[in-house]
Amino acid sequence: MSDKLNKIEDDIRALNDIEINDNEVRDITKLINKAVNKRIKVICLKTIASVVIVVGIIFLLISPLMKATNVNVKEYSENMVGEN
């Protein structure tokens, strides 16, 4: 475990010795923002698609069940006329 910690500390020291230009920082920041925004768009589209699919499946399952359980009072009353 200490070997990994020493390696990380050495990497941090090496990064501190590097001089980075402001233009390079801006370019790296733009690339990072572009990658993050792309990832967010993909996640949002997948989320929206999955919600639409789930709602569609629920509608396709519930709609026939509701139609099957619906009691048409007019149909029953017309069929029962004169049976009393």
Image: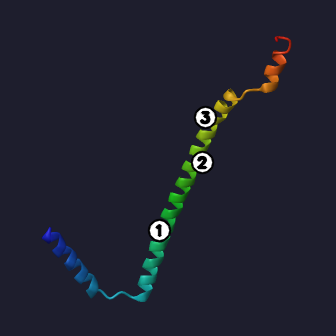
Q: Which residue is mark 1?
A: 36
Q: Where is 51 relative to 16, above or below?
A: above
The reply, left or right, for residue 37 in relation to residue 69 is: left
Residue at the (69%, 30%) spot, across then down: 67
Graded by Cα atoms within 10 Å as few (under 14), some (14 to 19) or many (20 or more), the crowding at tag 3 reads few
Measuring 79% from the left and 26% from the top, which residue is drawn there?
73
Q: CA distance from mark 2 to mark 1?
A: 24 Å
Q: CA distance from mark 1 to mark 3?
A: 37 Å
Place of residue 71 in the rendered image (x, y in percent of width and height, measured from the top left) = 73, 27
Q: Comparing marks 2 and 1, which lies closer to the viewer?
A: 2
Residue mark closest to the camera, 1 vs 3: 3
Q: Name the amino acid type tagged 2.
A: Val
Residue found at x 85% / y 15%:
81
Examine the image and state in which quarter residue 11 appears. bottom left
State the quadrant of the C terminus.
Answer: top right
Q: Residue furthest front?
A: 84
Task: Left or right? Give the position of 76 relative to 9.
Answer: right
- Could you give the CA–CA distance between mark 2 and mark 3, rounded to whole angstroms? 14 Å
Q: State the mark number for residue 14.
A: none
* Residue at the extreme left of the image, as rendered: 2
- Marks 2 and 1, the one that precedes in the sequence: 1
Q: At label 1, which amino acid type do we have?
A: Val
The reply to whether callout 2 and callout 3 are in contact (CB within 8 Å) is no
Q: Residues within 10 Å of mark 1 (few under 14, many from 20)?
A: few
Residue 61 image label: 3
- Residue 52: numbered disc: 2
Task: Pick whichever, 3 or 58, lies toward us.
Answer: 58
Which three-letter amino acid code belongs to the residue tagged 3? Leu
Residue 73's place in the image compared with 46, above or below, is above
Residue 59, located in which quarter of the rendered image? top right
Q: Quadrant of the N terminus?
A: bottom left
Callout 3 secondary element: helix
